[in-house]
Image: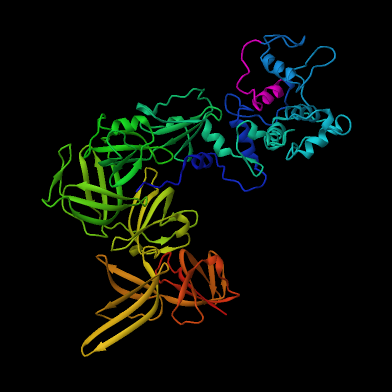
């Protein structure tokens, strides 16, 4: 299966800028500002500062208009024509002034001057932008400036613009004015921004699409973390794995992207080391590679070539995949001398072949194939020397030029309460800390800090942890701390049968809306209601009853019963009871039930730590 990443391309870019997807309401200030910057309508100084409080001159305004027009890519940087006595052909804005006057957006003064350094007022700017939109005097009612300001207001050009009639525009006012321009209707009735090829939805410019369109990459940092950028690195903005950073923090093999208009670099350190077990659909033209049992899409021609039949890597080699922001393979290199280490719980382990041994193209002898649920939530397959490992045991896996070494881990426990801010047992959890809840049967669930906030964990709940160079917990392996690894079902029928010295049972249960009946040569201590199904070696071993409460109030997150609040599991199973039949139920959703029209029974687990969540809800019509 392809590894799933939270950071798809446009999402990652937006998150890196602390900008999120917006509803159909006014874009916030940062989004409007970064949109105008991304479009090249307004640029920052050498440090990247937009100086939004500074006043805007007429010359500066015409350059912004040109960048917000169909002529944005056609204005030359050479000398223009001297159309005004105060604008020589060598003036830095002469070409833009020529364009603005030829298109009729702006005019000079009766004395033959343009006055390029003179600041521009709100009404002058609105007049120019109305002309850019195709409106002329016949579309206006009244005299200057009232007619121009009224029309601009009606079109939405003045939304969020703080400047008033007669006031000089600041660069912040221009940000708002030009953003409103993109979402306004032109004289033809079309949304102006769409005529320039931009996406405008519900009155907002699609910022993510703008950024991704102008972002270049992926590239791979060379020795010493060196990167090649087509703009000055003074004041450049750098994000490394989504966190504010600097170019000096870049390392060799970091995958990076850049946006020249934003003067921003995004770097990613995600890489996977393991045995290359196959490429698809063919060695001639591969589009995906499988390493450590996980398939990754190939995102560049360079990576595709290296993994092809003409390239340097073959099946069985231990390689390192360098992953980009969308999780695709940006490049492939030989396994580095600095080993990659994974931690996790064994899901399965078996001999590598019927002969008990196989070998890779590099000559490493293999005796076992072990699947490990790693702390990042990904199950990886490792081919290694040595014996198989018991399911549910915790291990570390080192992969490098010396091959793959799988090592069992001794318990390393902690106890205490996890705070919402991320402190636990005297340690701080690192940003993006990988947390895995496990059980002794190889069950696992990726957990996030918010899931553990306020939970008291015993030494028995913590199996292992590692610390980063800052002394923060960066990996945490738990055991039965949340109940999220367990299998939950609703028993609709439970029958115990005795015959002489033998006992048998028949049980029918619903799990995720599917009904199953089991006839077993033993009896479980459950009756109709919520239950936990316990497995061993893939076979049902026992059932255990959940605890029940009568729910009097319900939200998507919590349920109230007996003046106590219970958390509702994100994977809660909701069943609607058929009032005409005692044992007939229908799967439904939280949004379809409430505490006013239904009698609600919640079934919750008894796990310590962060357990005690409602796992099954049964709704009976009143």
Q: Quadrant of residue 61?
A: top right
Residue sitting nearer the eye, 278 or 212: 278
The outermost residue toward the front is 188
Instruction: Tell whether 322 sits left or right of 381.
Output: right
Residue located 85% across and 30% down the image: 145
Q: Classify the position of the C terminus by image quarter.
A: bottom right
Expressed as whole percent of the image width and height from the top left, the position of residue 567 reads: 50, 66
Q: Which residues are magenta?
A: 59-79
Q: Quadrant of residue 506?
A: bottom left
Instruction: Tell whether 541 sits left or right of 50.
Output: left
The outermost residue toward the left is 355
Expressed as whole percent of the image width and height from the top left, the position of residue 149 reads: 82, 34
Expressed as whole percent of the image width and height from the top left, the position of residue 176 reads: 70, 35
Residue sitting nearer the eye, 244 or 594: 594
Instruction: Tell whether 18 sits left or right of 81.
Output: left
Expressed as whole percent of the image width and height from the top left, the position of residue 30 reads: 62, 39
The outermost residue toward the bottom is 500
Instruction: Count how many numbered circles sit on residues in the image.
Output: 0
The outermost residue toward the right is 142
Q: Is residue 187 magenta?
A: no
- The colour scheme applied to this rendered structure is rainbow
Q: Is residue 372 above or below residue 121?
A: below
Residue located 43% across and 24% down the image: 228
Q: Is residue 77 magenta?
A: yes
Residue sitting nearer the eye, 146 or 172: 146
């Amino acid at each position: 299966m392809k590894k799933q990443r939270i950071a798809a391309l446009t999402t990652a870019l937006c998150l890196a800028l602390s900008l999120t997807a917006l509803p159909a309401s006014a874009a916030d200030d940062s989004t409007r500002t970064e949109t105008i910057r991304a479009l090249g309508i307004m640029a920052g100084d050498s440090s990247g500062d937009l100086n939004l409080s500074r006043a805007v001159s007429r010359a500066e305004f015409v350059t912004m208009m040109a960048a917000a027009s169909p002529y944005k890519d056609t204005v030359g940087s050479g000398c223009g024509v001297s159309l005004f006595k105060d604008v020589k052909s060598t003036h830095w804005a002469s070409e833009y002034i020529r364009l603005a006057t030829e298109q009729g957006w702006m005019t000079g003064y009766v004395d033959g001057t343009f006055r390029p350094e003179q600041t521009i007022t709100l009404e002058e700017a609105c007049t120019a932008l109305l002309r850019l939109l195709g409106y002329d005097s016949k579309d206006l009612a009244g005299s200057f400036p009232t007619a121009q300001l009224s029309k601009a207001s009606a079109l939405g050009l003045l939304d969020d613009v703080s400047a008033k009639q007669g006031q000089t525009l600041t660069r912040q006012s221009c940000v708002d004015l030009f953003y409103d321009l993109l979402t306004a209707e032109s004289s033809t009735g079309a949304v102006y921004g769409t005529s320039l090829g931009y996406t405008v939805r519900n009155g907002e410019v699609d910022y993510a699409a703008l950024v991704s369109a102008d972002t270049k990459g992926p590239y791979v940092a060379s020795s010493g973390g060196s990167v090649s950028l087509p703009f000055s690195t003074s004041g450049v903005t750098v994000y490394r794995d989504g966190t504010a950073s600097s170019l000096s923090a870049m390392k060799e093999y970091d995958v990076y992207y850049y946006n020249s208009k934003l003067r921003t670099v995004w770097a990613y350190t995600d890489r996977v080391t393991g045995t290359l077990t196959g490429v698809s659909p063919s060695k001639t033209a591969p589009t995906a590679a499988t390493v450590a049992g996980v398939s990754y899409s190939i995102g560049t021609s360079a990576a595709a070539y290296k993994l092809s039949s003409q390239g340097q890597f073959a099946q069985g080699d231990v390689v390192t995949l360098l992953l980009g922001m969308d999780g695709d393979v940006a490049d492939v290199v030989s396994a580095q001398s600095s080993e990659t280490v994974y931690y996790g719980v064994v899901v399965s382990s078996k001999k590598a072949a019927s002969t008990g041994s196989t070998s890779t193209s590099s000559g490493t002898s293999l005796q076992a194939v072990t699947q490990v649920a790693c702390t990042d939530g990904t199950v990886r397959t490792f081919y290694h020397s040595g014996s198989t490992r018991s399911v549910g045991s915790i291990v570390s896996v080192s992969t490098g030029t010396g091959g793959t070494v799988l090592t069992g881990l001794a318990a390393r426990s902690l106890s205490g309460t996890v705070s919402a801010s991320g402190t636990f047992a005297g340690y701080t959890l690192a940003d993006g800390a990988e947390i895995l809840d496990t059980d002794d049967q190889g069950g696992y669930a990726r957990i996030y800090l918010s899931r553990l906030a306020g939970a008291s964990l015993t030494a028995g709940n913590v199996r292992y942890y590692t610390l980063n160079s800052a002394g923060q917990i960066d990996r945490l392996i738990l055991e039965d701390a949340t109940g999220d690894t367990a299998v939950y079902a609703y028993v609709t029928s439970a029958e115990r049968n005795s015959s002489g010295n033998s006992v048998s049972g028949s049980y029918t249960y619903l799990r995720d809306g599917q009904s199953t009946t089991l006839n077993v040569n033993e009896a479980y201590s459950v009756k109709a209601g919520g239950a936990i199904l316990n497995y061993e070696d893939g076979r049902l071993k026992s059932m255990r009853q959940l605890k029940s409460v009568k729910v009097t109030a319900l939200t998507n997150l919590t349920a109230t019963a007996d003046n106590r609040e219970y958390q509702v599991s994100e994977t809660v199973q909701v069943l609607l009871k058929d009032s005409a039949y005692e044992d007939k139920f229908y799967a439904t959703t939280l949004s379809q039930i409430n505490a006013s029209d239904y009698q609600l029974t919640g079934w919750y687990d008894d796990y310590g730590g962060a357990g005690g969540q409602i796992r099954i809800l049964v709704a009976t019509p009143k």
